Image (tube, rainbow, N blue to C red):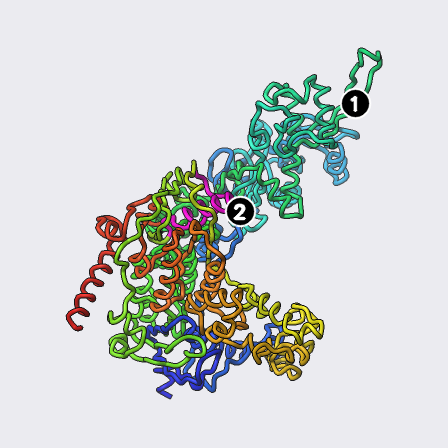
Amino acid sequence: MSQFNDFIEVKGARVHNLKNIDVSIPREKLVVITGLSGSGKSSLAFDTIYAEGQRRYIETFSAYARQFLGGLERPDVDKIDGLSPVIAIEQKTTSKSPRSTVGTITEIYDFLRLLYARASDAYSYNTGDKMVSYSDEQIKELIVSDFKGKRINILAPVVRSRKGHYRELFEQIAKQGFVKVRADGEIKDLTKGMMLDRYKTHDIEIVIDRLLIDDSVDNDKRLTETINTAMHHGDDVLMILDHDTNETRYFSRNLMCPTSGISYPNPEPNNFSFNSPKGACETCNGIGTLYQVNEKKIVPDNSISIKAGALAPHGPEKNSWIFKQFETIAQRFNFKLTDAYKDIPEEAKQMILYGGNEKFSVESKTLGVTRDYKIDFEGVANFIENQYKTAESTSLKRWAKDYMDKVICPDCEGSRLKKESLYFKINNKNIAELANADIVELTTWFNDLPKHLSEKQFKIAEEVLKEIKARLQFLLDVGLDYLSLNRSSKSLSGGEAQRIRLATQIGSQLVGVLYILDEPSIGLHQRDNEKLINSLISLRDIGNSVIVVEHDKDMIERADYVIDIGPKAGKYGGEIISIGSPKELLTHHTLTADYLNGTKQIEIPKKRREGNGHFLELKGCTGNNLKNISVKFPLGKMIGVTGVSGSGKSTLINETLYPILNAYYFNGVKKPMPYKSIKGLEHIDKVIDINQSPIGRTPRSNPATYTKTFDEIRSLFAKIPEAMIRGYKAGRFSFNVTGGRCETCQGGGLRVIEMNFLPDVYVECETCQGKRFNRETLEIRYKGKSISDVLDMTINEAVPFFEHIPKIHNKLKTIKDVGLGYITLGQQSTTLSGGEAQRIKLATELSKRDTGNTFYILDEPTTGLHFEDIRVLMIVLNKLADKGNTVLIIEHNLDVIKTVDHIIDIGYEGGKGGGEIIVEGTPEDVANHKKSYTAKFLKKELAQLIIKNEELRIKN
């Protein structure tokens, strides 16, 4: 049994491309699984170990519960021993909802809500006084002690500062047996048909009882009943009126302002949530921003007439109902549609924009008759606003948005909460002020807080404070000190989102758990990488096992144990080629070891490209944290954009530059972040953005369909003489439409057998034996291969097979060139890793004809790539740049940064401390900068390369 405590034993793993491997993974250690892209790392870590852990967890539920969960398929492995509960932190992006924030993802905001609901002090928004609340017994005692020997009226407030005649209310009060009311400070007898001035604001209280306060028992009983009755009618508030002095005092079961009598409901966590109707600002529904119509966008040029198109949404005059309405308004206000918009009377402009409803008459002098007109017009601005709020079509909403501005909500001023929620304070701060502070400020505030709490508050808040501090500390540990809790998760970079999820997991401080992480260093600068590795080590030290699928050099060197899977990728991988400590790994002759010990390396180019002398100049960028920066992108070069996580790289390139170029060349609809001007667009002719989103979400999508190669292959098969004789068209060779596919499995090749109380089982379709097509279709052969055989070919096999068909050959050749020769044409997109999917996109773009003036944007293309894969990728990107194209890469990987021609480094820090251009120039120039974090690591990398090259020269 002891071996189970020390190792996780995996026997006979055959998932995807794993070749029946056996492996022992030490427990309570930091274990890195590395190897080429597509060699089988994720298959071992996620599809075998994690999948089995999940399956065993679900097996513990009753059969009844399992049928609702949907079972999990047992991974193809003989057995796994020594498995503890498994938690996976994968590369999934965070929620794109505007309601999701850093505070809600990390649960810190939930604890803050709890803290404010239990330990805050409420203040009146009218007077700023501290609110009070009493129990019925306390109210009775206060009345007896403060009004002893005095005559008082006990009143129940029913109307506060509202207009109306209230005839029905008075009738209702009379029916309940009351005889007097106090209206606007004057006590009156209730009479039949009594009413007030409906256009003035009124305060109305019911007179519940009038009594003299003394010590008699009868008086005590009567007072108790009166208080109950007054609370019932006054919605938990009552009012005491001193008979002699006419002074009033309020008492409430809820929180209440002792001076003005306004009361708040007793706080619950929901009162501080912008996702609950109880707490959310009613104007913006808890979003914090609104879209408002901008009159300048509706009338961009007021020197032209309505007829010539002054109103941008409607354009020049047409024979339409709306222009007939404008004609009528013109007659009413005595102007012509040919007059310049700025000369139109102000009331007419108001009616055109905001509508109106009126009748008027016009006397015709020539005919001597009077004609009646009626204007019933919604108004251009109102129409746009209504379309934005109610239209079901996205294009209509988008049209309306073009004439609107996103503004901060005027009621809550961006805090997202109701006014009452903002007047609950702890140490003079409300919850919105805390959510706006960055993590460093917040941590300092919480460390200082216990001094400012009363003993009772501290006792209530102690546990909650502990939870908040632990979570804040972890955000600091992974280098996210510049974020604030109300930062929308939509605006987080990939690296930030991944680390926040890690912070949430590690914040739970579980022990004895197996954590599996999928490349947590993605999007992390080397400076932050150190913090991340330390976090994982501390996770290991408290008694957890940590398995990391990773290519990062620092992570491999700091691991306790490294498993290298290879030797190549796809069907040529799936074997364990090296296992042991990082030092042992260096002695083996694997690709990973060769790159780590310097036998192989990614070479620095002998000469940096000069470029074509043209520039793309972007001025005045102020989106997110950018500090009004201006950048010159030299064309005809390979450009690297670097900087720490959160410094503003994605804002500058993906949110500002790309939308500008996309709108200019392809009429893209995405709005760029604010900028002043851009010059040099005439020097390039198109832009191509290759990002990290998956290429297909269904098993029917595959590399052949994504790259459109399958369309050409189907057309080729349709032209084979046998197919033409039978009248088969290209559609006959598709597995997505009826005709040529196997109808038993509908072209899937597998059949799902639903097992009650057990996981669904996928079995090979018995009709087509997994070939996806029916017998007649499979009889058509090209060079002896059927359409199904072609889908089963690897790219390496397909390239020579189709060499005489240029359209197919060229596309397949580019897939091979980006290092994906090992995948099959028909491999399901869902089984491709992130790095593979991105390279298929790259191959698709590369196979299109380039002009030598194309601007390529790649966002961290080395995601999920091994050193060898990066070398292959750089060869392809260099070919593009050599043809005169501009290749811009957002990247942290030093192997890429050292080979580019021009670096633009953004920093210095992330968040508020970032958004500036620190240094620009060749890698050698940048490496000598004193303050840049990138420079520090780049200098070290370049120096190591020189030493290694010298050692190799001496050795040879």
Q: Residue at x 71, y 31 (%)?
A: 318
Q: Which quarter shows the N terminus? A: bottom left
Left/right placement of residue 669 relative to residue 445 reads: right
- Of the pair 503 and 397, the residue shown nearer to us: 397
- Of the pair 386 and 847, the residue shown nearer to us: 847
Majority SS type along the magenta span? helix
Q: Which residue is mark 1?
A: 373
Q: Could you classify mark 2 by the number of other residues whose Cα lies within 10 Å: few (under 14), some (14-19), or many (20 or more)?
A: few
Residue 251, given in percent of the width and then of the height, sits at 56, 40
Residue 826, given in percent of the width and then of the height, sits at 55, 72
Number of the front mark, 2 or 1:
2
Q: Which mark sits nearer the N-terminus, 2 or 1? A: 1
Query: For residue 672: magenta?
Result: yes
Mark 2 to mark 1: distance in Å?
A: 47 Å
Residue 483, given in percent of the width and then of the height, sits at 39, 50
What SS does tag 2 mark? helix
Left/right placement of residue 542 relative to residue 239 reads: left
Q: Which mark is residue 95?
A: none
Q: Residue at x 80, y 14 (%)?
A: 364
Q: Which mark is residue 666?
A: 2
Q: Quadrant of residue 219?
A: top right
What SS does tag 1 mark? strand
Left/right placement of residue 390 relative to residue 679 reads: right
- 316 over 79 or under it: above or below: above
Magenta part of the protein: which range?
646-675
- 508 over 442 or under it: above or below: below
Q: Could you classify mark 1 by the number of other residues whose Cα lies within 10 Å: few (under 14), some (14-19), or many (20 or more)?
A: some
Residue 735 appears in view: no
- 928 over 387 or under it: above or below: below
- Of the pair 139 and 279, the residue shown nearer to us: 279
Tell me whether circle 2 and circle 1 mark residues in contact (CB < 8 Å).
no
Residue type beneath disc 2: Phe
